[in-house]
Amino acid sequence: MRTITGELVEELFVTAFVVPVTLLLWKNPMTVTLVLIAGSVGMFVLWHRAEDFIAFVTAFGIGFFADYMCTKANFYTFGAADMANLPSWGPICWGFICVLFMRGAATLYRILHEVPPFSNDRARGVLLFLVQIVIVLYYWKTVTLVSRHLAATVGVVLIVGARVWNTERDLCAFLVTGLAGVVAEASAIHLGIWAYPDRSYFFTEPFRLPISIPLVYGAIGVLVYRASTLATRWRA
């Protein structure tokens, strides 16, 4: 088994190789598409696990559907689209970054279990319980702010979701994807890669992104993680 440091180095190397190129060349969709395809192939050569492949395919599908529906509804628009108001690299980017997020979540899980003081079951349990409380309160506040009529419904959904998807791995996937998603969105908006016309529910400066972004990315992270666990079930 690789060390935690070794896994972090690999993940940072893959990120540093592809992400800056994507951010710098986003005005040339075909170039970014080719870079992401090459990066994805290299990633699977390095990490040829079934879990990574399923995460990639799941995120590819979710990303394409989300981008298509949201641009159709004019929730956000892309600065350089070359395919029906969408950039051709969009779904590949979703797949690529979600594999990185899932591996980051797995590394966080290892840290929580192998690095003191988190390796102590009680300390880790208290920490993750506090994280759950923060997530629920933030979710409730966000939905109440956007639509008070949905608050009660979402409250029920949260209770059910917390009962079903409340493992430590779920929380790691939610945290890593939610926080990394904020960084990705802030960078993309700053560079003009995409934009949100309606700023009614935005954070104040300097973030300039919808307040629901951490929750949306976190939820997608859990869905992608859960889908990737199918590989483990098939092997069993």
Image: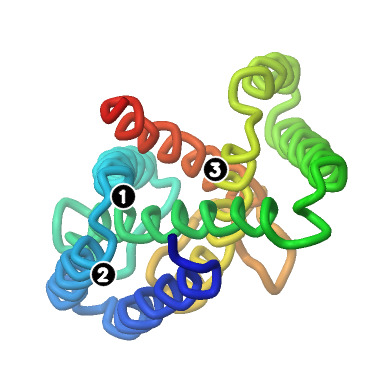
Q: Residue at x 27, y 41 (%)?
A: 54
Mark 2 or mark 3, which is nearer the start of the sequence? 2
The answer to whether one can see residue 60 in this image is: yes
Q: Residue at x 35, y 33 (%)?
A: 232
**Label 1: which residue?**
52
**Label 3: which residue?**
216
**Of the pair 39 and 34, the residue shown nearer to us:** 39
For residue 99, what is the image quadrant? Answer: bottom left
Q: Secondary structure at mark 3?
A: helix
Which labelled disc corresponds to residue 66? none
Q: CA distance from mark 1 to mark 2?
A: 29 Å
Which labelled disc corresponds to residue 80? 2
What amino acid does circle 3 point to?
Answer: Val
The answer to whether one can see residue 72 in this image is: no
**Of the pair 36 and 99, the residue shown nearer to us:** 99
**Of the pair 24 and 201, the residue shown nearer to us:** 24
Mark 2 or mark 1, which is nearer the start of the sequence? 1
Q: CA distance from mark 3 to mark 1?
A: 21 Å
- Of tags 3 and 2, which is closer to the observer? 3
Q: Secondary structure at mark 2?
A: loop
